[in-house]
Amino acid sequence: MNKNKAAHKPETAIESERTDKAEARLLPDLRAAGLDEIAAVVRQLEQPAYRAQQIFDWIQKGIRSFADMTNLPADLRRRLAEEAELTTLEALKIQISKIDQTRKYLFGLADGEAIESVYMEHSYGTSGCISSQVGCAMSCSFCASTQGGLVRQLSAAEMIEQVNAMERDTGQPISRIDVMGSGEPLLNYANLSRFLERMHDPRGRNMSYRAFTVSTCGIIPGIEALGRDFPQVNLAISLHAPNDVIRQQLMPINRSYPVKELLAVCKAHADRTGRQLTYEYILIAGVNNKSEHAAELANRLAGSLCHVNLIFLNPVTESGYKPSSMAAARVFTELLAKKGVSSTIRKSMGADIDGACGQLRRSSVTGHKDIK
Ligand code: SF4
């Protein structure tokens, strides 16, 4: 997809792309299949109905291959391996932060592409930040993920497997999931929906929708769809500017969805769902971190059910932007508070391994120097 075109004509749903390998199989990818879909496969294979539950349970445990389904007959395991897909991600590289033990994973995909995901430990539990697309078409000027444009959508199976693979490596269940890695999730809505449904399935992982946060650069039709279909899922908006002039400089999507329109839809979303929205605001020295910017933002957000996360820019070689000083960040948060807008100066995790916001990239296969 042409990235400029995508910025002007966003779509809320793009069908998942399947690999040639997957298309060669007779049966579907079972990684993101529901119990009913697995039951249909079991019928197709003329196996007893109870096998569906067994297969489903193994997949929920995040096993790596059909061969690991040890309570299935060897012949059935062999047939599944030959005829069905079970997307499995292997880490090509794992970097561990010396600052906070955050782990950044580079996962290889079946078609030779690669994506990054991040695992974090907090006082309240564990969280995973996953990618929703290979690359990104949105061209935000401070972000590493968009440097090579959009390559393709990630399937729901590839999103689920990012979580599984981090859990397999750490041995820890992930309790919160942020869809905040590379990509714009609301432009991969069909696969995002399937991912959320599968992770929430009470017969499977049974994760509360409230454990998920979907972050968007402000795709209005997608925000409306998410509010309608998944009202309990947390919504984070990458705002990063108080007005159209600055936002357009940072985020080309603002030409399609200007600040006033976006904030009106966000307010309607919060009213409809009763859920507090988060606005992400990366503080960039001299660009959007001055007192006048804080005052303008405070005026726009006053009275809304929201919280502002103020984030220090994590420098990306290509952008040339510099992070704000702590002093400017403190003034910013005080000015927001004066208008009753709550905010937090957020600690970036994994900054020493380029694992923080805006630093995730496609892969080492693209030849970026800073994937070590
Ligand atoms: S900030 Fe998000 S939407 Fe913008 S380019 Fe980066 S990944 Fe894409």
Image (spheres, rainbow, N blue to C red):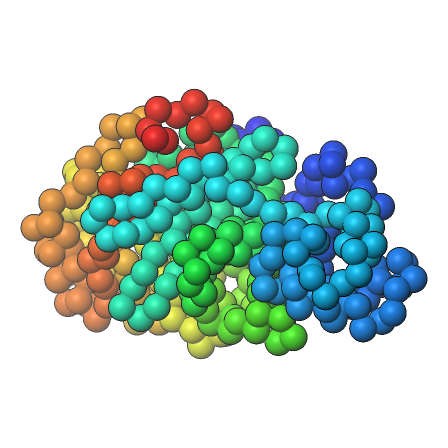
Where residue 56 sits: x, y (%)? 70, 66
- Given residues 372 and 275, the one toward you in this image is 372
The picture quadrant where one finds residue 254 is top left
Residue at the image position 39 percent from the left and 42 percent from the top: 94
* Image vertical order of residue 100 relative to residue 344, above or below: above
Left or right: 94 as drawn, with respect to 53: left
* Image vertical order of residue 232 relative to residue 170, above or below: below
Left or right: 372 as drawn, with respect to 255: left
Residue at the image position 27 percent from the left and 46 percent from the top: 97
Residue 324 appearing in the image: yes
Where residue 241 sits: x, y (%)? 30, 47
Residue at the image position 74 percent from the left and 71 percent from the top: 53
Residue 250 appearing in the image: no
- Given residues 332 and 267, the one toward you in this image is 332
Residue at the image position 28 percent from the left and 61 percent from the top: 308
* Image vertical order of residue 39 relative to residue 314, above or below: below
The picture quadrant where one finds residue 22 is top right
Outermost residue, left side: 327
Where residue 314 sits: x, y (%)? 26, 41
Quarter of the rendering occupied by the N terminus: top right
Where residue 179 sits: x, y (%)? 47, 54
Quarter of the rendering occupied by the C terminus: top left
* Image vertical order of residue 228 relative to residue 77, above or below: below
For the image, the number of numbered tags is 0
- Given residues 354 and 51, the one toward you in this image is 51
